[in-house]
């Protein structure tokens, strides 16, 4: 599990840190996570990336020039800032372009907004990433991640 | 000092480790010495070779991993030094060929040509062992020492900005990637 913290992700990162079966790698920049996940895949270890949508934006060359070029499975858990209900002005532009960019990159994605399906969707996204050898994204929405 | 001579001097040491290289001249020159299934050439995604080596080293702590990086690539992902230093896998060796140039894309000078000190940056990032070498003999001894040691090491090798005649090899990217992964899985079961 590679991660770069943000407020919505703090609890998930703590869970990863406390799980003895998981190796947590705290990054300086999200794109490093593409290399870490590729190394894990070569090693036969399943991995996930935990990041904000702006971290996804910062990782696009790594996705195209490594994960797509070399058919590397990536499970990307992306907090979906800048969408409905966003109060922070600085998050709003990233919210506008997240889904269009996922579509332009032909990355299969699913918007997660209900707690009861989270486990199943993560398992399904991992299965698809591993069978298709490509990045798959789950967008973690405000409804799922944040109590107003 | 020529990079090709450096690579040749340690080629026999690379047999029992996992090797990750950057694109361009480094990949083409190592490949020209003779490809092996434990060599992975990252032919794009500049900056991520060191991250890939870190991922391998963290998942396979018993396995020796060596990354052949370059000044241009490392300057694109300096944060990788801080991440490697944070987890400091004992069997990861990080070699940076510093030719002060983006040779493979036309020879444009990088910031190491105007004084940026990669050894200083690596040391300040927290890499426990860092050294700079300027001769093939010192390169060979620095690499072999690091490979026998048990501490994350970054070796800055100052080399001339000279590359091979051609960068494209006859090994397809996907063939290389699948072969590399299969090789590692074989190691795990043997």
Image: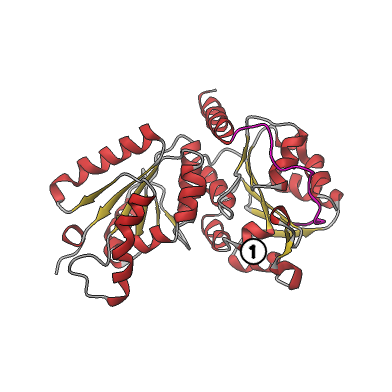
SS at badge 1: helix
Q: Main secondary structure of the magenta part?
A: loop
Q: Which residue is mark 1?
A: B122
Nearer to us in this view, A60 or B22: A60
What chain is tagged by disc 1?
Answer: B
Q: In the rendered structure, which segment of residues is drawn in magenta?
A: B157-172
- Label 1 crowding class (10 Å Cα cut-off): few <14, some 14-19, many 20+? many
Q: Residue at x 14, y 51 (%)?
A: A114
Residue A92, position as x, y percentages in the image: 28, 70
**Magenta includes A76?**
no
| Side of B56 where B120 appears, left or right | right
Vertical placement of residue B170 versus A94, above or below: above
What's the residue at 29%, 61% (across, down)? A9
Going 27% across and 64% down the picture, which residue do you hit? A8
Q: Is residue A13 above or below residue B17?
A: below
Q: Nearer the viewer, residue A9 or B115?
A: B115
Q: Estimate the x, y position of residue B16 in percent, counting from the top left.
A: 66, 33
Give B29 or A5, whichever is nearer the viewer: B29
Q: Position of residue B156 (x, y in %)?
A: 73, 58
Q: Is residue A62 left or right of residue A111?
A: right
Relative side of A84 to B168, left or right: left
Disc count in the image? 1
- Above/below status of B4 relative to B118: above
Q: Residue at x 46, y 34 (%)?
A: A44
Outermost residue, top direction? B190
Any part of residue A14 in sight = no
Say if the magenta span includes residue B161.
yes
Can you give x and y, in whole percent of width and height, for residue B169 in the image? 69, 36
Q: Which quadrant would the C terminus of chain A be assigned to in this image?
A: bottom left
Q: Residue furthest bottom?
A: A89
Q: Nearer the viewer, residue B126 or B21?
A: B21
């Amino acid at each position: 599990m590679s991660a770069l913290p943000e407020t919505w992700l703090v609890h998930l990162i703590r869970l990863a840190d406390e799980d003895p079966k998981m190796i947590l790698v705290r990054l300086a920049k999200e794109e490093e996570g593409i290399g870490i996940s590729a190394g894990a895949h070569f090693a036969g270890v399943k991995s996930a990336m935990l990041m904000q949508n702006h971290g996804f934006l910062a990782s696009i060359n790594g996705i195209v020039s490594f994960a797509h070029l070399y058919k590397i499975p990536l499970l990307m858990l992306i907090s979906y800032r800048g969408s409905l209900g966003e109060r922070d002005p600085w998050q709003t532009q990233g919210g506008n372009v997240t889904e269009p960019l996922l579509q332009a990159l032909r990355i299969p994605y699913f918007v997660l907004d209900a707690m009861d399906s989270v486990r199943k969707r993560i398992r399904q996204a991992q299965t698809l990433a591993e069978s298709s050898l490509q990045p798959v994204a789950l967008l973690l929405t405000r409804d799922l991640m944040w109590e107003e | 000092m020529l990079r090709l001579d450096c690579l040749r001097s340690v080629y026999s040491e690379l047999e029992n480790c996992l090797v990750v290289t950057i694109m361009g001249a480094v990949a083409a020159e190592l490949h020209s010495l003779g490809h092996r299934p434990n060599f992975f050439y990252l032919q794009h995604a500049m900056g991520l070779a060191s991250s890939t080596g870190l991922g391998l080293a963290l998942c396979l702590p018993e396995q020796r991993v060596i990354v052949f990086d370059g000044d241009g690539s490392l300057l694109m992902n300096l944060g990788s030094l801080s991440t490697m230093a944070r987890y400091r896998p004992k069997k990861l060796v990080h070699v940076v060929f510093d030719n002060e140039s983006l040779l493979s894309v036309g020879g444009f000078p990088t910031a190491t040509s105007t004084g940026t000190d990669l050894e200083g940056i690596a040391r300040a990032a927290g890499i426990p062992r860092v050294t700079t070498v300027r001769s093939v003999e010192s390169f060979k001894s620095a690499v072999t020492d690091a490979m026998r040691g048990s501490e994350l090491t970054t070796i800055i090798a100052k080399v001339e900005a000279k590359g091979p005649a051609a960068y494209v090899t006859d090994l397809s990217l996907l063939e290389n990637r699948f072969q590399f992964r299969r090789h590692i899985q074989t190691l795990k079961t043997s």
